[in-house]
Structure formats: structure tokens, C-alpha cells
Image (cartoon, coloured by chain):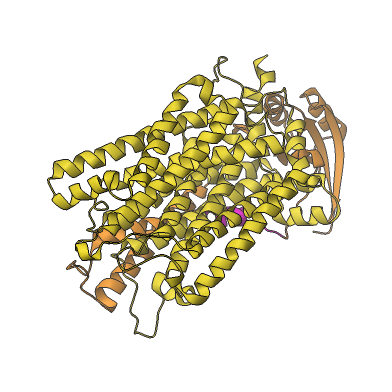
Amino acid sequence: MERDTHFVLGVYEDEDVLMNAVKQVRSSGVKIHEVYSPYPVHGLEHALGYKRSRLPIAAFLFGMLGTSLALTMQFYMMKFDWPMIIGGKDFAAFPDFIPVSFEMTVLLAAFGMVGVFMVSSNLKPWAQPRIFDLRITDDKHVMAIDLAVNSGMDEEKIKEILSSSGASEVNNKSFDE
Amino acid sequence: MQVTSSVRQPLVTGGKTYHDVTHDVSRQVEGKPSLAWFLAFLTAAGVLALGAIALVATLWEGIGMWGLNKTIGWAWDITNFVWWVGIGHAGTLISAVLLLFRQKWRTSINRAAEAMTIFAVICAAMFPVIHMGRPWIGAYWALPLPNTFGSLWVNFNSPLLWDVFAISTYFSVSLVFWYIGLIPDFATIRDRATGLRKTIYGALSFGWDGAAKTWMRYESVSLILAGLATPLVLSVHTIVSFDFATSVIPGWHTTIFPPYFVAGAIFSGFAMVLTLMIITRKVFKLEDYITMGHIELMNIVIIITGSIVGIAYITEFFIAWYSGVEAEQYAFINRATGPYWWAYWSMMTCNVISPQLFWIKKIRTSIVATFILSLVVNIGMWFERFVIIVTSLHRDFLPSSWAMFYPTWADVGVYLFTFGLFFTLFFLFAKFFPVINMAEVKSVLKSSSEKAAN
């Protein structure tokens, strides 16, 4: 997109002040772009109105895939492709296949879910994130308001809402990309 | 909503602010390494180089370099393998099981414990690989790969193959779990750095921006990974114990092995975490994060698992007698009174008696006593595996096959190599990676620091 993006940032010191501020700012009609924190703040996703993550579903599906691949592989190799008598056991010795099936379930569930997480959150070594404030990864929470999205509202008014909600600083930030 | 009782000890002492947490942990990564670190690193690298001679000799000449014989086909190698895997259990236990149980004290020790897990599993995996004799073609023996025999597959009925899957899954899932936790902290270092360091930590941080949506997904991923890693960590040592328990060798053929091995693994793993953390907190001045409270809690885990191990030893003996099987009875009497009596009684003293000292509050809150006992526990756990493996094998079914095991210089050298590797990797980690999970410590700071209590 060939346009400048302008944001107003509210900087918060404390997670409880931030939580109230999110509710206050949203109820005053301002649309929040995103909140950035140095650590996970519990309940913030509810305050922001985010839907529950569907990553557990991805983990379950990948896990199922792991189980079926492992069982298919073992039954194919041991029962059909090259059956051998080992200790007088049945060729399809199902109990013996449980450990490997379990491990493959865990392996695929973990890697599949983490892979989906990486893709959905755009995490990759060459990613260039938008850093709104360097203190986000240290000790400050930052609420970013996209001015283009809130064009119906006056910039000064937004700033006033932010400072009355408990922000210790209110700044402007622009990115050109 | 969670309520933390005010009588609980604070997890972080010294009235730290969020910025103090960032600063105290990041300065280790940013500053020049201290002289103490250099000396420690060079010692570890020296041991690694020395051990490499034995490793190369073993690879060049074959495992005939070791003291194995026809009767005792498994000795130091498999002892060391099980010992290292056991040590590698604490990290995932701390980060996964304690996460599910909402034990917040895990936050300042989980990073280093997980690193230790990963390095210990690398050391462990080396032994079965070398023991294959020709590891360069070992992939065909260990993995279900198509081969020129049409394909003659690996044997899925064998616990040794289950081990291949268990250890490699455990290693890779632990690595991913550890790395996901590192990403936000790498971002912290990135945002404090300039120049080359910013580029390197920027790439390592995968473009982390701390958005609430990403944190929500991160939390979800951590919880599911913990849920997956909990049965995984229990399965790994269970499957290691199957290597013995599914055989028909008296002394190995026991159903108690899986829980007994898992308890022993947690026992030795916590001991190794204590050994490393006591050094790390001292060298990096992290006493406010890894407090006496942490050390005491880990010592309590050692009392519990040590007692479980003790009960398992006694139960094993009782069942051998109660079974009425002569060979089984002999195997156990021979352990305690035969030519390897000294190994058995070292094991009993170090693992059963010494951790009981932690019932005394003065001992479990003493750094010196904890450090010494943590070493004693790991010596004891090495003897446990040696006793199980060698004493069960050395009196074969035919008295004409009876033998003793004498380690050669190559046995000792390869073991030294893994020590060198473990400590070299740990010291590199301690210098270049944030040793404490900053983001997680910050998340518990408000509810459980000294400041919050006041």
C-alpha cells in the first residue's frame, strides 16, 4: 500500500490501568488498532473483543494426522509389505504399535500447531515488524489507534480520551511503506 | 481469577520493576563475558577436546575400544545414555507439568532447565548412535527408510525402535517449546541493541511485535504444548525402561520399571538443575530471581522423587523374593552382596539416604548443602543405571559365561566428551541467550513480588 499510516499511541505503565483503559476507549467509540505489551496480560484479549484462538483445533487435526500416518505406516510395513515372525507375535501386533503412534501424534500436533502459529502471526526470521515504541518489549504497554480507521473522529479528541483513560504519555507515530 | 495468598513468599525479591527485570537479564547477553565465564567455558571446551580423542578412536577402531565383552554387551554406554536422558527430564517437567499445575515459581528457572534438557538429550542420543558401531549407515537401522533389501523394514515390535521415536520426538518438541518461549525475550534484546547484534537478535526474534493477538496465540500454543509435553515426558523414560523391562533377563524383567524410571529421571533432573542454577545465579548475580524459595521447592521435589525411588528399590527386592523365581532372587541378592556390592550400596546411600537429609529445613535452605547433595544424587543415579545394567548381565545363565566389566580409557573418554559437550553448550547458552524468561517473570511480577506484598 502506497500511503503513510498515522497512529496515535497511548502509553500505559500498569496492566490494570491498561485493562480499564481498553474498555473505556472502546466504549467511547474509538476503534483500537492493537495493544502491544512486554508480557501476556490475562483477559486483555476479552477486553479487546478478540475471538478465541483456533490453534487448539489445528493441534488436534495435526495430531489425528500423526496417529493415522503412524498406524498406516506400521500396519503396512509389518503386516503387508514384509511380514516377519518376531517372537511368535501376530504380524499386526497392535499393542506394539502404540508407543510409536503416540510419539508421532505428539510430534505432528506440536509441529503442526507451531507452524500454523508462525504463519498466522507472521513470525519468520526475515520479518520486519512495525515497532511502535521500543519500550513495548521492556516495561510499557502501548495502545495504537489508527487515524485512518477513526477518520470520523477528531485527532485531538482521541488524544483526550487516551489521556483521561490513564495513559502516561500520548504520542504520534507514522510509518511510510 | 487467581488469588495469591499474602502469606506466600514473593517469587521475585529486591523490589524489582519491569525495567529491572529486563536490565538484569539482558546485561548478561550485552556485556563482555566475565573472567569466570571464560575460565569455565575454556575448561568445558578443554574437556570436550580431550574426550574427542576417545570418540574419534571409538569411531575409527570400532566399539572394540570399549570394555564390553560377550557377556556384558551393554555397560557404560547405555548407563550414560539412560543417565543423560534422565537428567533431560527436569526441564520439560518444570516448563510443562508445572505450567499445567499453575506453579508460578517455575517462571524464573524454566528457561535454563529447558536448555539443560535439550543439551542432556543431545549427550544421551550420542551413546546409542555410537554403539551402533557404524553410525554413518545407522539411519537404515533406526528409521523406517526404504533400502536395497526390498524393503526390509525396521522392527516396530522392538522397544529399541520405540526409543528412537520417543527420544527424537522429545528432543524436537522440547526444542520447539524452548524456542517459542525465547522469541519474546530475543525481541527485548533486539529493541535494546544496535548494529550487528540488532540484526542477529532481530532474526532470532522472528519479527516479534508483542501484539495482544500474538500474545493470545502464544499463550494458547504454550498451553497446548504443555499438554502435549506432559504425557510425552512421562512416555520417554517409560519407553527407555521398556528397553530393559520387555526383555527376559532376570533383574530387568520387572513391571515396576516405567514409574520407577520416571521418578528417578525427575529426581536426577532436578538435582542437575540445582547444580547448574546455584552456579548460574551466583555468577550472573540473579539471587533475586532464583531465590532460596526456589531452591527449597526443588529440594522438596527431590525428597519426594528420592523417596519414590527408594520405595521402588525395596519393592523390586521384595517382589524378586515373593515371585519365587530362583534366577530373579539370585539377581537381586547378587546385586547387594556379589562382586558389584559397592555399586549397589553407593546407589542406596546416594539415592535413598542422602535426599532424606532435606527433611531438615536447615539443610534444604543451605546453598552449600544443596549443591553437594545435588552432586551426590547424580552420582547415585549413575550408579543406579550401572547396577541395573551391568550386575544383571555379568552373571550369565551359564556360569562358564560369567564375567566382569572393566572400563577402558575409551569408555571414560567418551563419557568425558559428553560432559564437555554439555557444559560447553550450557555456557554458550548462558552467555548469549537470556537465562531467565523475562516475559514470564514480568507476568507474575505484579502479583508476587515484594513490592506487591507491601
User: Where does the magenta region start and end?
Assistant: A111-125
> Residue at position x 40%, y 57% from top?
A103
Residue B446 left/right relative to B193: left
Q: Position of residue B18 (x, y in %)?
A: 73, 31
Q: Nearer the viewer, residue B103 or A61?
A: B103
Chain corresponding to yellow in the figure: B
Residue B199, located in which quarter of the rendered image? bottom right
| Apparent side of residue B44 relative to residue A64 in the rendered image (left or right) | right
In the image, residue B211 above or below residue A72: above
Residue A71 in the image: state x and y as whole percent: 32, 64
Magenta segment main secondary structure: helix
Q: Residue B74: name its quadrant.
A: bottom left
Please tell me how many numbered marks the rendered image carries: 0
| Residue B67 in magenta stretch | no
Q: Where, quadrant-wise, is the C terminus of chain B in this rendering? A: top right
Q: Does residue A34 appear left or right of residue B109 in this picture? A: right
> Which chain: orange?
A
